[in-house]
Image: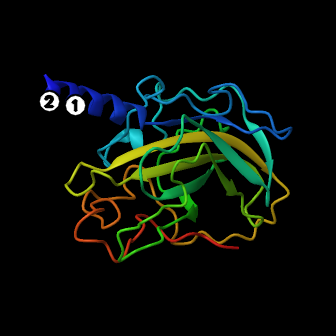
């Protein structure tokens, strides 16, 4: 009975540690309603992760692929976009952000995000490598933010937030990926960004055996972490 109770409690705790990114912080500081400018994700109720990096869900994890969010929000280049987390980031691992420019003739609401269109604008890594006190900047965060590069072109984009949970990533298929895509319209950009050689597709950007996906978090104590995907594009 005690063992069964412990297992049940463990399952509840694991579920509670899962999370989504359903909202954003508006220009007036208020938090938006769920899924207004962010595409509804398949895990909106379960909060569960993607564990197969080759899944088509790696694009935007949409509940209904092909159906965009009802709104696209204006964002000034050089400003910050903030996702509100439900409930908080409950697992250790890196936070990454990508942008994909909407092709001519489409909108952020109709673009499916497929193909080599994504470039990375942010990634973080841990402190305490080589010690038993490994910490990640996103641990426990209830909001996560990224600066939209000043050098991007004006126009509509998909903004993809991704958190890679590594607590069970020591075997292939153990990684847990949580993500959402916001629909944004960028204004005030200089258009000087160079994304040559930096564009990737989802799925396709990661392999199950990439060192940032297949990772032993606990023992032996890790001495380095290599973020998966391309380098961050800079202005």
Q: For residue 211, what is the image quadrant?
A: bottom left
Q: Which residue is painted at 32% across and 59% down in the image? A: 213
Q: Where's residue 106, x and y in %?
A: 65, 39
Residue 3, label in figure: 2
| Residue that numbered label 1 is attached to | 6
Q: Is residue 88 left or right of residue 203?
A: right
Q: Where's residue 122, x and y in %?
A: 59, 63
Q: For residue 85, what is the image quadrant?
A: top right
Q: Where's residue 55, x and y in %?
A: 33, 42
Q: Is residue 209 left or right of residue 202?
A: left
Q: Is residue 134 above or below residue 208?
A: below
- How far, Cα to Cα, is label 1 from label 2? 5 Å
Q: Where's residue 117, x and y in %?
A: 53, 55
Q: Which residue is painted at 22% across and 31% down in the image? A: 6
Question: Within 10 angstroms of label 2, few (less than 14), some, or many (20 or more) residues?
Answer: few
Q: Is residue 232 above or below residue 206?
A: below
Do the CB atoms of the residues marked 1 and 2 lie less than 8 Å apart? yes
Q: Which residue is painted at 23% across and 48% down in the image? A: 173
Considering the numbered disc 1 on the image, is that residue within a helix, a strand or a loop? helix
């Amino acid at each position: 009975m005690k063992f069964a109770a412990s297992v049940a409690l463990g399952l509840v705790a694991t579920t509670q540690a899962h999370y989504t990114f359903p909202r954003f912080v508006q220009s007036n500081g208020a938090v938006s309603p769920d899924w207004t400018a962010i595409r509804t994700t398949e895990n909106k109720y379960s909060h569960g992760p993607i564990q197969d990096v080759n899944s088509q869900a790696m694009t935007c994890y949409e509940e209904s692929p092909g159906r965009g969010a009802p709104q696209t929000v204006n964002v000034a280049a050089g400003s910050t976009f903030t996702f509100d987390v439900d409930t908080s980031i409950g697992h250790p691992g890196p936070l990454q952000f990508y942008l994909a420019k909407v092709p001519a003739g489409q909108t952020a609401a109709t673009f499916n995000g497929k193909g080599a269109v994504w470039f990375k604008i942010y990634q973080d890594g841990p402190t305490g490598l080589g010690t038993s006190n490994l910490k990640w900047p996103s641990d426990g965060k209830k909001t996560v933010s990224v600066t939209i590069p000043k050098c991007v072109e004006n126009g509509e984009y998909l903004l993809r937030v991704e958190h890679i949970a590594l607590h069970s990533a020591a075997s292939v298929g153990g990684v847990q990926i949580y993500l959402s895509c916001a629909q944004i319209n960028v204004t005030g950009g200089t258009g000087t960004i160079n994304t040559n050689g930096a564009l990737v597709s989802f799925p396709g950007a990661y392999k199950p055996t990439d060192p940032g996906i297949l990772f032993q978090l606990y023992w032996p104590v890790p001495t380095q972490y290599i973020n998966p995907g391309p380098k961050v594009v800079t202005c």
